[in-house]
Image (tube, rainbow, N blue to C red):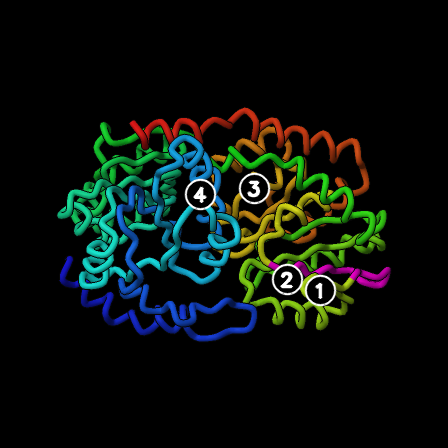
Amino acid sequence: MRIFYNILLLLVLPLAMYKLYWPRAGKPSVGKRWPEHFGVSKKVSAVDVWFHAVSVGEVLAAIPLITQLKQQQPQCKILLTTTTATGAEQAQSKLADLVIHRYAPFDLWPCIRWFQHLHKPKQLWIMETELWPNWLQLCQSQNIPVSLINARMSQRSCQRYLRFKGFSQRLYGQLGQVLAQHQDDAQRFNQLGVTAANLVVTGSIKYDLPDTKNIQQQAEQLRPSLFGERLIWIAASTHKGEDEKVLEVMQQVRKQLPDSLLILVPRHPERFDQVAELIASSGFDCARRSQQQSPEAKDAVYLADTMGEMLLMYACSDAAFIGGSLVPIGGHNYLEAAALRLPCVAGEHDFNFSDISQQLQACGALKLSADTEQLANWLKAWLSDAEERNKAGDAGLSIVKQNQGALARSLAALLN
């Protein structure tokens, strides 16, 4: 199986390189740093923690953990790797003073061996689910303990891994410890080969969000100057095939609330121009944040085509649609919206966040449907009724607060 895996990896490497390096509009470039993907980079000596976060979402989730670690251990030298240029961009803007960044080596033996030789990390912490067989095997051979942080394992993914049970058990059995978000995640990791002694249920560190007071203060100044008194809903982290449905929802919302505004935030920056064209073809006038355009009364959509401003856009909104859920992506994190007291709607494909979803649905802060008319009805109801909107938003915020503490539990387990 391992030989087959390495042959397959070599075959798909050109495709991976194409996706990483081929220039696209709105996508940051790896540039001259491409050799880092092959393990070749400037040496970083005495690395205490090699921390891997594949892309933007994982980097953002890692920020509070890294910040707390540096507060507790200021001398700790952290080498943060990302696979994508967008992840590197976030690392540079949010963590430049706390970590040294390199691109992660491809899962090829020569690349990983050279990376380890250059940096000699004492341990590897991986955020969420980014596991590579050769990484784990070579870390084990070099006595580098590996921890999987904020780990989740959906039933769907578990069943896929179990089709190759022998391979999966060897893969997961090499982990030093797994900090699982929930008990059902821990049980699935156990099925896949992680011993009970190496499993700790910490909760999700995504509940331990940064203090939102500063963001809310920014929004209090920005919203009236940019949007006036318009009712606003946000469609966050939308994917290809989903924006069309979001715009259908907006058409129905505008029938009842003609002055309402949609803030549309595509998940991937390379799609910004495509989405702008789609908005125009749908008959809506649009203002773009990247061009510093202020939405006029005729503009139904505000395209938030910048990076790193999701929280600010949430804070300027009254309700939210969470993307990746009207197409079979598995959804995205509801917690940032909930922490800013936004009632949420989403499609039915939210299997990556099933536990959070169930809690928010139970308290009335989240509603799911594949039907655009139903989504529009819920949004119209919340936008039209401030009391009901605030009630749902407060319930979601309460769920966030009840589940906080995973950050401290995770650090305690990692530093034990």
Tag 2 residue: 305
Mark 3 vs mark 2, CA separation in Å: 20 Å
Inspect the image, locate mark 4, and give the three-letter code of the amino acid beneath it: Ala
Mark 1 vs mark 3, CA separation in Å: 24 Å
Q: Earlier in the sequence, mark 4 or mark 2?
A: 4
Mark 3–mark 2 CB contact (< 8 Å): no
**Which of the two marks, 1 or 4, is nearer to us in this view?**
4
Q: Position of residue 327 (x, y in %)?
A: 52, 57
Mark 4 vs mark 2, CA separation in Å: 23 Å
Residue sitting at 75 percent across and 40 percent down? Answer: 382
Q: Earlier in the sequence, mark 1 or mark 3?
A: 1
10 Å neighbourhood of mark 3: few (<14), some, or many (≥20)? many
Q: Is residue 261 magenta-colored?
A: no
Q: Earlier in the sequence, mark 2 or mark 1?
A: 1
Mark 2–mark 1 CB contact (< 8 Å): yes
Q: Position of residue 220 (x, y in %)?
A: 77, 42
Q: Earlier in the sequence, mark 3 or mark 4?
A: 4
Mark 4 residue element: helix
Residue 378 in sight here:
no
Q: Name the dominant secondary structure of the magenta segment.
A: loop
**Which of the two marks, 1 or 3, is nearer to us in this view?**
1
Mark 4–mark 2 CB contact (< 8 Å): no
- Does 33 sit above or below residue 166? below
Left/right of residue 187 with respect to residue 166 in the rendered view: right
Tag 1 residue: 288
Residue 218 in sight here:
yes
Tag 3 residue: 334
Residue sitting at 64 percent across and 42 percent down? Answer: 344
Inspect the image, locate mark 2, and give the three-letter code of the amino acid beneath it: Asp
